[in-house]
Amino acid sequence: MIQSTLRSQRLVAVFLLCVLLFNYPLLALFNRSAEVFGIPVLYAYIFIAWALVIALLAVVIERSA
Amino acid sequence: MLQSWVIIPVALAYLGMLFAIAYYGDHRADQGRSIIANPYIYALSLGVYATAWTFYGSVGRAAADGVGFLPIYIGPTMMMALWWLVMRKIIRISKANRITSLADFISSRYGKSALLAGLVTIIAVIGVVPYIALQLKAVSHSFTILSHYPEVVLPAQREAVPILADTAFWTALVLATFTVLFGTRHLDASERHEGLVAAIAFESLVKLVAFLAVGIFITWGIYNGLPDIFARARAHPQLTALFAPLGGTAGSYASWAWLTVLSMLAIMFLPRQFQIAVVENVNENHLNKAIWLFPLYMLAMNLFVIPAAFGGVMHFSSTAVDPDTFVLTLPMAEHQEALALLVFIGGLSAATGMVIVETIALSTMVCNDLVMPVLLRMRAIRLKERQDLTGLLLGIRRGAIVAVVLLGYFYFRFAGEAYALVAIGLISFAAVAQFAPAIIGGIYWKGGTRAGALAGLVAGFVVWLYTLLLPSFAKSGWLPIGFLEEGPFGFALLKPYALFGLAGLNDITHAMLWSMVANVGAYVMVSVLTLQSVAEQAQAARFVDVFRRAGEALDVHIWKGQASLPDLKALLARFLGPERAEAAVAEYARRRNYSSPADMPADAGLVQFAEMELAGAIGGASARIMVASTVNEDALTIDEVRTMLDEASQVIATSHELKQKSQELMAATAELRAANERLQELDRLKDDFVSTVTHELRTPLTSIRAFSEILHDNPELDAGERQKFLTIIIQESERLTRLINQVLDLAKLESGRAEWQVSDVDLKAVIENSIDATGQLFRAGNVALETRLPDGARFVRADRDRLVQVLINLLSNAVKFVRPDEGQVGVRLFDHAGSLRVEVTDNGPGISFENQKVIFEKFRQAGDTMTEKPQGTGLGLPISRQIIEHFGGRLWVESTPGQGATFVFELPVSPSTIRNDPTGPDLYNATSQE
């Protein structure tokens, strides 16, 4: 039970991180015409942040399983 | 060459494979060896979210907006993080209440309202059928395009193809057949379709593989990797706009945020998502893996969308090719036959998966929440009297499936290329988002009422209709365009895309904002203003507290009426079939520990069980109607429930009172017992006293008698001897008199009949008088007396004679116990903390610790009375203590054996003298100087 609420709290924390990552103003910071390895920085940012969130979800779920 | 005769068999072979998988899945389920009972299949089947609109449409949106389409997939990722909290609760509630559709869920929460269920069904059908049409269109178009291989020819504005020559029509028919075959194979109380879910999971895999394949081909086959595509796109006139900082205005971020919210709600409340995530869920722990696997699936699905879009735009910059078709037309233009065919199959799988699941979900709602309630209420067809309704139910279900698919087909035929069809994806999302307040509010807030949910849904739906659906009709030319541009009848304030003058937002953001304001506002306001019925309250508690309920045993059944087991069983048999009804009732009896169902009482629990079983087959609202008509049920009014609750609380209060009474009784008994014990003790003490007194009286009497007899029998005794004996007789007589006096005195003191003459007495004078009175004793024993008395008078409130009695007793005791000639006795009077203290000290043998208490008891003296001659009556100290305590003081002894003893008593200073005496404070100064 304790583990279950702990997991819930971590998941909510990941959700809040998502709200931060995928919204103004963080999005606006990366919304510029620069490139990393030939990829526009905004596109790279969104996909990397997305992958990071999925990795966090996986860690939270699999470690408390 | 890809001719129709190649494509059609391949497509049919693919569908055949789906049939095989579904059949195998059902077969395994029947054997009890489910192939879908694992989290990976569950996560994959959630991929039904990605439809043909994703498969083809994402690229189209990316070609126009760049990253603007991504919130549709990032939103669900965010929502998945909350699924452990929200979706697990919805699944638990649905399993506990045998809920099989969205409409059922909402209506069950708000008191099994048939009206609410019907309304939800209508919103879902209106919102989602055009979406089905879009899938049919995608299949038909992709087929048409592919059949012109290798030329890239877009289907022109639809010429009037006869229905029978229309691929979309045949697609619709094949899908309807498939859905009927696997969606309504039998009536399942939980509405689960294992084979179908297996097929859907397979389809998710196929569309992912197809999309990744074409993405990789475009990125590395046509171009030289991602940097190459982006570098070229940057230089392309049509695409440079997507590279500048985009969406720089606050409005764009707002629309991004709203799109995220919209897709967060869609992933929960699209009928197909609810069907897969909730109804088809085998085990709620499968959510775990799905929480990260499903977002991963969506990430993979979107990796190559932007490269494909840019690649397509650059590749077809000279010819007008619809960006929605890039994933198909690019491989065709590059003469990749096999890849093009794979893409077509991928698109087909995306479209069919959506159509199948959506249709099943809608048909369940249409059958249970629209058709059945109407049929059950129509007396003309006497449905309630029919014996076996399973066939009818299946028939309705199948009819609903065919009707929904055909409805989708006809909408597609009617709308064609119209905006109303092209833009339906998000419009559809916005329609189902209207369910969110009623559902989310319903599972966390007990206060939400049926009227509130109805008001919220109607308000949200009307705003959606006005700000999204009607404008899309206007853009399609079905309504005058002036409706959009000038507002209805020229009311600019009511322009559907700028309601009340709110301009500057895109259509979806604008519609979501207003519809949510209307929906949530109406839901909350009306809920707060209306009262819940009994059924609503019960359901609200069942939903909100689902995790707190340990099991059915704890359920309180607020129900009143008469039922009979045969009636209920017959009712179940009509909808579930006789065998399943029998099995269900037997199982329920076993769970309640009855050896046979016949022994079971037809009580509220059984009625609820029957209703729940029925709910699985025909939905909560219809089940309520059927059960109500079968059992002789009395409608409960709020007043009756209040009465029931009052009775219950009265019983509780009464038992509480009883408990209190019995506790009081026990306390009284204990008191009585204690009193009785005290009485017995007193009785024993009296007996002891009497026997001690008589013993004490006998001792002097014995000696008086003995010496008298000696004198009487021996007249020849000489004068000296005779004199001695007579002296003893006189002394003993005196002792006897004293003893009797003291016994009488003590009896008076103890009974409270003693007479006290209380006045302010100068203690110093009392001490001096007592010393004078006992002076003879001191002189006779040659005992030294030392006194230390204060200068002034010290007043206490007491009886003077009694105090003299106490002091004489203490002084004579002291003289008695010191050795003659060496004896020293000291008397001290001093102030001590507001009291006056008197100490009488001697240098006698002292009193051992255990005797220090004993000496204050009656007839007890220090030392062994059996061997030593008693030196007193044994009543002096008890009497003295009684006297001192009567005046509010205390008397005790301090002694170390061998070093003498000090008898101390304390009396409070007379209050009147403190007040009257101006030197009062000095008294205390004197104390501290002592």
Image (cartoon, coloured by chain):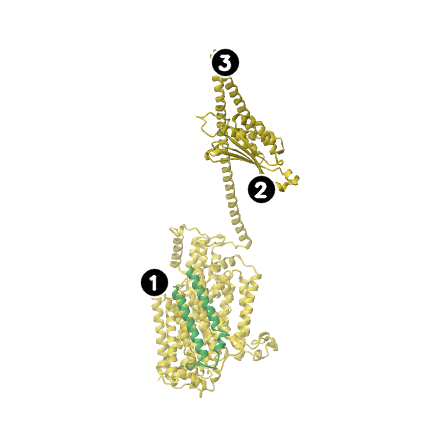
Viewer-side residue, B403 vs B670: B670
The shade of chain B is yellow
Tag shown at residue B719: 3
Q: Residues within 10 Å of mark 2 (few under 14, many from 20)?
A: few
Element at label 2? helix
Q: Amino acid at mark 3?
A: Ala
Viewer-side residue, A33 vs B404: A33
Q: CA distance from mark 1 to mark 2?
A: 101 Å
Disc on the earlier residue, 1 or 2:
1
Residue bearing the label numbered 1: B32
Residues at marks 3 and 2, common chain?
A: yes
Disc on the earlier residue, 3 or 1:
1
Q: Amino acid at mark 1?
A: Gly
User: Is residue B217 rendered to the left or right of residue B776?
Assistant: left
Q: Chain of mark 1?
A: B
Q: Chain of mark 3?
A: B
- In percent of width and height, residue B223 lies at 39, 84
User: Is residue B700 rendered to the left or right of residue B146?
Assistant: right
Q: Residues within 10 Å of mark 3 (few under 14, many from 20)?
A: few
The reply to whether the C-beta atoms of the residues labelled 3 and 2 are less than 8 Å apart is: no
Instruction: Between label 1 and label 2, give the one nearer the viewer.
Output: 2
Instruction: Between label 3 and label 1, give the one nearer the viewer.
Output: 3
Tell me the green chain. Answer: A
Q: CA distance from mark 3 to mark 1?
A: 130 Å
The reply to whether residue B387 is in sight is no
Q: Chain of mark 2?
A: B
